[in-house]
Image (tube, helix red, strand yellow):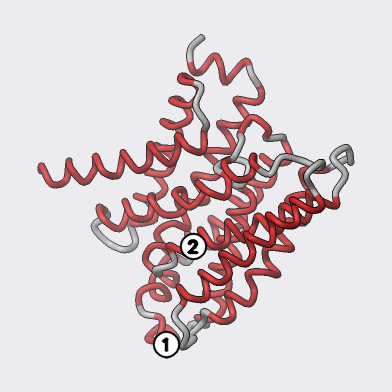
């Protein structure tokens, strides 16, 4: 069967396609800000912190309950936000280097999540699926969640791109001009957490960081100005995600790993092409 026929005839493949493209929109929108703000380690830290939320929810939710996927998302989001709040507070104009705080958060939350799953949740579900992602387990609820986040996050970022750019590149000057930089700082943390928790089944804890970083790296390298970095990042994320999904479906490969590899190779190829021209 052709690629389009496969995705038309098999609902789980169509769910994978829609969810992956939806996550591409979200990550492509946030990625330039994460990279420019030098929060590359932040996405990885929060994604590993989300493992704590997943572990707690898997341990105490019944696998046969109605609306399991929604409550798993909601519980994981709530626990992750609670865990991330101290990190967000202490990285806003703090004296201690951000990487030290992020590293502490990274190891503590991930270790706690693994221990909780080992003690309480071994019979409640497979944690490995959340480590590396499994798009074949996506449900309509997962699609609705990604769709709602697109409707919420993308307008808030795209309509205020100029403000976000000012906040990212010159926070002190922006604060002097009257922009509430604290609100933008906390909003960025909130958006990253939302996207990571929504994307755990697609890319997983380990690999979602490539989705959050590589589009932004590409955009900052090739875009002619700061405003256009959002467009470049979004187009790169959509193109590479679609290409990776085709490759994964054709060669029977893991989707999350395919996305990470395709994005990395595409970025390196773009560097070679730019150097050649």
Identify the residue at the far top of this view: 1
**Could you tell whether 190 is left or right of 273 in the image?**
right
Identify the residue at the far left of this view: 277
- Residue at x-position 69% and y-position 41%: 142
Answer above or below: position of 97 versus 208: below
Mark 1, Cα crowd under 10 Å, few <14 / some 14-19 / many 20+, is: few
Q: On the image, numbered disc 1 is attached to which residue?
A: 177
- Residue at x-position 65% and y-position 55%: 51
Which comes before the other along the chain, label 2 or label 1? Answer: 2
Quadrant containing the C terminus is top left
Provide residue 268's location: percent of width, then percent of height. Answer: 26, 43
Q: On the image, numbered disc 2 is attached to which residue?
A: 159
**Could you tell whether 101 is left or right of 177 in the image?**
right
Instruction: Pick the residue in front: 275 or 118.
Output: 118
- Residue at x-position 76% and y-position 40%: 125
Provide residue 45's location: percent of width, then percent of height. Answer: 54, 62
Instruction: Pick the residue in front: 104 or 8.
Output: 104
Answer above or below: position of 130 versus 136: below
Provide residue 174's location: percent of width, then percent of height. Answer: 41, 83
- Residue at x-position 33% and y-position 56%: 228
Residue 85, picture quadrant = bottom right
Q: CA distance from mark 2 to mark 1?
A: 19 Å
Secondary structure beneath dot 2 equals loop
Instruction: Pick the residue in front: 54 or 277.
Output: 54
**Could you tell whether 40 is left or right of 115 in the image?**
left
Provide residue 192's location: percent of width, then percent of height. Answer: 56, 60
């Amino acid at each position: 069967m052709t690629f389009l026929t496969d995705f038309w005839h098999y609902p789980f493949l169509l769910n994978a396609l829609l969810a992956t493209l939806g996550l591409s929109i979200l990550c492509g929108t946030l990625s330039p800000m994460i990279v420019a703000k030098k929060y590359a380690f932040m996405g990885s830290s929060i994604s590993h912190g989300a493992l704590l939320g997943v572990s707690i929810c898997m341990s105490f939710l019944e696998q046969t309950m109605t609306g399991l996927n929604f409550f798993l998302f909601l519980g994981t989001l709530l626990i992750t936000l609670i865990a991330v709040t101290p990190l967000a507070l202490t990285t806003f104009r703090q004296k201690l280097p951000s990487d030290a705080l992020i590293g502490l958060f990274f190891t503590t939350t991930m270790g706690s999540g693994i221990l909780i799953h080992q003690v309480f949740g071994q019979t409640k579900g497979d944690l490995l699926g959340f480590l590396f992602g499994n798009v074949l387990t996506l449900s309509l609820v997962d699609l609705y969640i990604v769709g709602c986040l697109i409707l919420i996050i993308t307008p808030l970022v795209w309509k205020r791109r100029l403000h976000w750019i000012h906040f990212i590149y010159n926070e002190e000057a922006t604060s002097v001009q009257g922009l509430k930089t604290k609100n933008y700082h906390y909003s960025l943390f909130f958006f990253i957490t939302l996207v990571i928790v929504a994307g755990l089944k697609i890319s997983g804890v380990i690999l979602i960081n490539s989705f959050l970083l590589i589009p932004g790296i590409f955009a900052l390298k090739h875009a002619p100005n700061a405003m256009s970095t959002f467009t470049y990042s979004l187009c790169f994320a959509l193109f590479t995600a679609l290409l990776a999904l085709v490759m994964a479906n054709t060669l029977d490969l893991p989707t999350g790993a395919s996305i990470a590899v395709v994005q990395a190779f595409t970025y390196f190829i773009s560097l070679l092409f730019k150097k050649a021209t």
